[in-house]
Image (tube, helix red, strand yellow):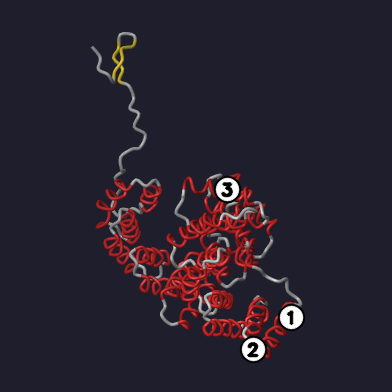
Amino acid sequence: MASADEIVCNGHVITLPTLEVVKAVPIMAAGTNIDWLLHLYYARRDFIRCRLIIERELHRSLNPEYMHFVKGLIDREEGNNIEALRNLQKALDLNSKNIETYKEIGKTLFIMGRFNQALDIFREAEELAPRQDHEICHFIGELLHRSAAAANQLAIARQEEAEAKMYFEKAVQAGKKLESFQRLAEILRKEKDYARAIEVLENCLLLSPENIEVLTEIGVLYLKTNDSQKAFARLSEVIALDRKCPKGLLAYGAILQSRNDVDGALEKYQEIALTEPDIPELWNNIGLCFFKMKKQKVIAAISSLRKSIWLSPLNYNALYNLSLVYITAQQYASAFHTLAAAINLRKDSAECYMLLGICLRKLEDTENAFKAFQRSSEIQQQQPADAGRNPLVHLNFALFCYETGRVALATEQFTRFVSSSQDLLLPTEEEHLDSSDLL
């Protein structure tokens, strides 16, 4: 009787061939260069065979640099970062001019959270590199960006942020690394250079045309530049690719909300709430939708805005918007406490002091109301002309001064109101409710 691996054919027993495709590690003579074989197994992520080769050939190889290098990479893949550093350092000792070894040591230190040491290693690699390397530039930019965020001194933070921006620009020029484009756009957005940030991300789409994160960010940036048509087009692409993208739906709803399509916006927000209900901006926008309805739902608006603040107590926009709703509902004491919290977050907000003055006037505290209006006017005057001054600051101060008998000061403030509003559309409470501030 033939076994399971044998068959009987014409009276003869024939052994079936094995299905094993990958052969055992070949044995080669001492001194043979087998780096190619080691690289082949590593590329296949066959770490077991890699270790077998390294253990057998390491001590008899004429050039064990690559073996230490690969062993370090395998150790890092398996989470043993200390051993990975030891092996990579051995490879570096054998060849102190290998840029790839420097880069892998820097990456390992980065993973371990030893950012200062990683930065020093990447700077050494930059000095040794014969030409600009996009990976080195990206990691130096990333490390400087992190260092700037953690810096205690503003001057140092700005200097490191500027240097990080320079390195991300070099990384974008030297190679096509998606993360470099995104980081550069993030810095440009922080600098409010929205047009340049959009340009960088549009180039990023050449690498990844259906990248939902990049498309969403472009849509949000178009909102910041008040180009709602292009924003709508990009966000429509996002929703077509992923109907459950929270950030895309939120921005899409913000556009509908800015066009006074409150029902359409609420429909989008409801889709987000089903999957990710704990987004502070979501409840801020929902509260404003209730507030903007023809039949205002003030209680629902207050409830939604309070939930937004509960999820994010330092959310300035939600605090400001809640104070507006409280004032509309004539709940001046509640508005006073909300504005106090908002002012603690932004002490240079002329609008907050203006609203505070209105609340105090309604609460019949005229002395402190005058101080609040005066402070709002001072902040307004200190702001540059192109910073979006609010003429209503001067108008409300003028009305208060007229009511309290300060006619000369009322005339002065009204004159400032007229001069500052000639070339501007008068803002209303909607100024803080537009689509760019909903995100």
The three-letter code of the residue at mark 3 reads Lys
Image quadrant assignment for residue 216: bottom right
Q: Is residue 18 left or right of residue 284?
A: left
Q: Specify which label sits upstream in the sequence, 1 or 2.
A: 2
Residue at point 42%, 64% (across, down): 100
**Where 246 falls versus 369 (above or below)?**
above
Q: Which residue is mark 1?
A: 418
Q: x, y (%) of residue 3? A: 25, 17
Residue 181: quadrant of the picture = bottom right
Mark before the other along the chain sequence, 1 or 3 = 3
Q: Secondary structure at mark 1?
A: helix
Name of the residue lying farthest toward the bottom: 408
Q: Residues within 10 Å of mark 1 (few under 14, many from 20)?
A: some
Image quarter (top left, top right, bottom left or bottom right) of the N terminus: top left
Q: Secondary structure at mark 3?
A: helix
Choose mark 1 or mark 3, whichever is in front: 1
